[in-house]
């Protein structure tokens, strides 16, 4: 049941918001509900008394959390309290009097365990390379030379004055390749040349060389050219500014100067290489994560991909798009987010709430916008429940399916008007969700992206009602396991709770569900597709020649089609809901061929007979005395070796081939023919 054991304290903040203790008690069963008016000041003694009792506390206030923590620290009770904001998210609203169920949902979510964040350590000793085109780069170097090991690299042809004193090396060159990150950049420099100390009116450079390598810790780009990295603003240690904008340059100098020391960077995703469907046998399959990563943090590494934790910016689009769960978001894992969703929906409905709408937002942009809408406007509607995540782009199809199966009437993704990075992956997830929800008659555009920086627009847009058909029997299922199993469970429950369920929904290319269509007439049961399939959707059988397919395991990676030598496989993206509960279907089954010596089954009869028909009496090895070799093809591997040994012939040492005719042979035959013809003309016998 929803709620947190212990005591929940909710304050009206000097009666600026309405409280509904009855709704809170229904939604937070198992928790001792206390209300206050001025907990952080005139009623601080009540907080101290609750703290002394030593029971876990949930405090519905984040503004004064530091004050409360100081009191707990004095008593040696650090970690006793959890804080949640219900004022800006619920109470401060034109619909605040009806926000009791939403407060219950928010308070219930505080009971969910926060993820342990692992970190990747980056170290910088302050070796700085400044790349520039003019005097601005020299001035930046002078500003940082006292604290960093500076080198300036000017573009060929740069017009700068020679320095009066040499504070740092000034070189000429251009970067041809760049990779790496803070503390570990690796650059290839062409047209590299050192400056001539005798330069007079203009800095001159000596003979140029190419292919040199530079490994700075920090890279300050003041060229004004195209950035050296994709998603350049997400690359740790790479600072860039327009050299024509003095304010931007000063900010960049300050940012670069701060990049000395040790930095802990969160590890945003967890990689399971064995589940990756990127490649098999040098055939490329799934490339979803590679196509979506805005930071260039993902690269192929044989059959799988690698995610560089030093470069990964944590957008989560790779994890949201990954069909197998090879890449999982770690802050938190997908199943943890879905458990929090279930807890919030359960508390909201128990407290009497209806038609819940979730608004997925981040902390940096979304939380500030929600606060502004509450402080200066009408705030959020009573049924719009904020759901904070690290990045909105980390949410995948499994979360959305679960939300509507639980009874949500709509979902908003709150993003910036101009997002920091491409949100193509999020748009694809929203489109796929809407197509599925529409087919199941949940509603049209039940999932929306709200791209705004305006709190008034936020408040007005969230008041637009969703034309959603509510499910009559919402499913409150629990989740556990891998992402693929969680996704399958969520889709099954979405279908079960649908207002008007249908069996099949056609999906666009790139979807994570679908069917493999095989032209069985051309299939030879070679099982190359089975060997390539990374999820076990295609399988063989050790006891008989057959090929089976389990649709709910197929991730539409395309490796089977790329590997099939007969080219008889095609993909059909779709969701076929009965497949989630159906056994594997047999695509093709053939009669096995039995060894003529021991009767052991091996291969398929059609394949053996087809091979024999192409060789018998046609290939030179199987003509005349070689006719015996046909029987070897009809034997299993063990009997074949025995027969070859007993008969004294070896396929690798075959019957003597007919000698190849040379020009001398043809000339001799011609001379003999002409001689015979001459004798005939003379009337002689041949």
Image (spheres, rainbow, N blue to C red):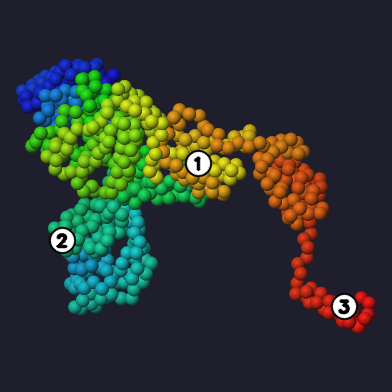
Q: Quadrant of residue 637?
A: top right
Q: Secondary structure at mark 1?
A: strand
Compared with 266, 30 (above or below) is above
The crowding category of the residue bearing disc 3, from other C-alpha atoms within 10 Å (few below 14, some 14 to 19, many at least 20), is some
Q: Residue at x 25, y 63 (%)?
A: 225
Which of pointers 3 and 2 lies earlier in the amino acid sequence? 2
**How far is mark 1 from mark 3, CA to CA?**
68 Å
Q: Quadrant of residue 244?
A: bottom left
**Residue denoted by label 1:** 517
Question: For this rendering, which residue is in front, 494 or 639?
Answer: 494
Compared with 142, 545 (above or below) is above
Please name which of the two marks, 2 or 1, marks the residue nearer to the observer. Answer: 1
Question: For this rendering, which residue is in front, 279 or 573?
Answer: 573
Q: Residue at x 58, y 45 (%)?
A: 522
Q: Residue furthest bottom?
A: 682
**How far is mark 2 from mark 1, CA to CA?**
58 Å
**Residue denoted by label 3:** 676
**Residue denoted by label 2:** 245
Q: Is residue 142 left or right of residue 406?
A: left
Compared with 273, 300 (above or below) is below
Q: Quadrant of residue 524?
A: top right
Q: Residue at x 21, y 76 (%)?
A: 202
Give percent across and percent down for residue 139: 17, 64
Q: Secondary structure at mark 3?
A: helix
Give percent across and percent down for residue 310: 33, 48
Which of pointers 1 and 3 lies earlier in the amino acid sequence? 1
């Amino acid at each position: 049941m929803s709620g947190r054991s212990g005591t929940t304290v909710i304050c009206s903040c000097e009666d600026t918001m309405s409280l509904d203790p009855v709704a809170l008690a229904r939604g937070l069963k198992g928790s001792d509900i206390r209300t206050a008016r001025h907990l952080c000041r005139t009623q601080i003694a009540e907080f101290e008394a609750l703290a002394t009792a030593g029971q876990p506390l949930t405090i519905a206030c984040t503004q004064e959390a530091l004050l409360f923590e100081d009191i707990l620290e004095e008593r040696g009770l650090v970690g006793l309290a959890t804080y949640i904001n219900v004022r800006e998210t619920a109470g401060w609203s034109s619909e605040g009097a009806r926000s009791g169920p939403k407060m219950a949902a928010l308070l219930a979510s505080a009971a969910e365990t926060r993820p342990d964040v692992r970190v990747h350590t980056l170290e910088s000793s302050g070796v700085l390379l400044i790349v520039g085109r003019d005097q601005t780069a020299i001035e930046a170097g002078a500003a940082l030379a006292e604290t960093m090991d500076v080198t300036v690299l000017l573009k060929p042809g740069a017009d700068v004055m020679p320095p009066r004193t040499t504070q740092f090396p000034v070189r000429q060159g251009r970067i041809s390749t760049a990779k790496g990150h803070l503390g570990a950049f690796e650059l290839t420099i062409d047209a590299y040349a050192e400056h001539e100390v005798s330069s007079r009116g203009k800095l001159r450079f000596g003979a140029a060389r190419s292919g040199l390598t530079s490994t700075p810790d920090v890279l300050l780009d003041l060229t004004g050219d195209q950035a050296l990295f994709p998603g350049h603003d997400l690359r740790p240690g790479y600072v860039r500014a327009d050299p024509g904008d003095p304010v931007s340059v000063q900010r960049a100098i300050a940012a670069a100067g701060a990049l000395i020391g040790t930095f802990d960077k969160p590890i945003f995703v967890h990689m399971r290489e064995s589940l990756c469907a990127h490649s098999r046998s040098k055939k490329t399959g799934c490339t979803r994560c590679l196509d979506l990563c805005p930071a260039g943090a993902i690269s192929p590494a044989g059959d799988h991909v690698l995610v560089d934790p030093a470069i990964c910016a944590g957008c989560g689009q790779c994890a949201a798009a990954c069909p197998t769960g090879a890449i999982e978001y770690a802050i938190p894992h997908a199943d943890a987010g879905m458990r929090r969703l279930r807890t919030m929906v359960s508390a909201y409905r128990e407290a009497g709430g209806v038609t819940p709408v979730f608004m997925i937002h981040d902390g940096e942009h979304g939380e500030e916008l929600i606060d502004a809408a509450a402080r200066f406007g009408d705030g959020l509607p009573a049924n719009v429940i904020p759901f904070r995540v690290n990045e909105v782009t980390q949410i995948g199809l499994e979360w959305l399916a679960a939300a509507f199966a639980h009874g949500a009437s709509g979902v908003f993704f709150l993003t910036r008007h101009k997002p920091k990075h491409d949100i193509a992956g999020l748009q694809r997830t929203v489109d796929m969700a809407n197509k599925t929800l529409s087919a199941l008659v949940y509603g049209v555009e039940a999932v929306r992206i709200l791209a705004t920086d305006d709190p008034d627009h936020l408040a007005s847009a969230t008041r637009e009602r969703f034309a959603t058909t509510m499910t009559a029997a919402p499913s409150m299922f629990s989740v556990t396991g891998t992402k693929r199993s969680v996704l399958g469970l969520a889709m099954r429950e979405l279908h079960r709770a649908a207002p008007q369920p249908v069996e099949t929904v056609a999906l666009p290319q790139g979807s994570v569900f679908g069917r493999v269509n095989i032209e069985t007439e051309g299939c030879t049961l070679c099982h190359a597709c089975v060997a390539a399939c990374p999820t076990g959707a295609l399988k063989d059988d050790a006891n008989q020649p057959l090929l089976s397919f389990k649709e709910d395991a197929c991730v539409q990676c395309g490796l089977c089609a790329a590997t099939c030598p007969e080219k008889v496989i095609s993909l059909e993206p779709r969701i076929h809901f009965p497949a989630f509960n159906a056994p594997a279907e047999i695509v093709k089954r053939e009669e096995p061929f039995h060894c003529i010596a021991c009767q052991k089954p091996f291969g398929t009869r059609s394949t053996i007979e087809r091979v024999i028909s192409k060789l018998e009496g046609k290939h030179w090895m199987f003509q005349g005395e070689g006719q015996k070799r046909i029987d070897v093809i009809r034997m299993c591997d063990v009997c074949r070796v025995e027969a070859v040994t007993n008969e004294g012939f070896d396929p690798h040492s075959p019957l003597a081939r007919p000698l190849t005719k040379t020009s001398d042979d043809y000339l001799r035959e011609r001379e003999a023919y002409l001689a015979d013809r001459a004798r005939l003309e003379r009337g002689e016998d041949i």
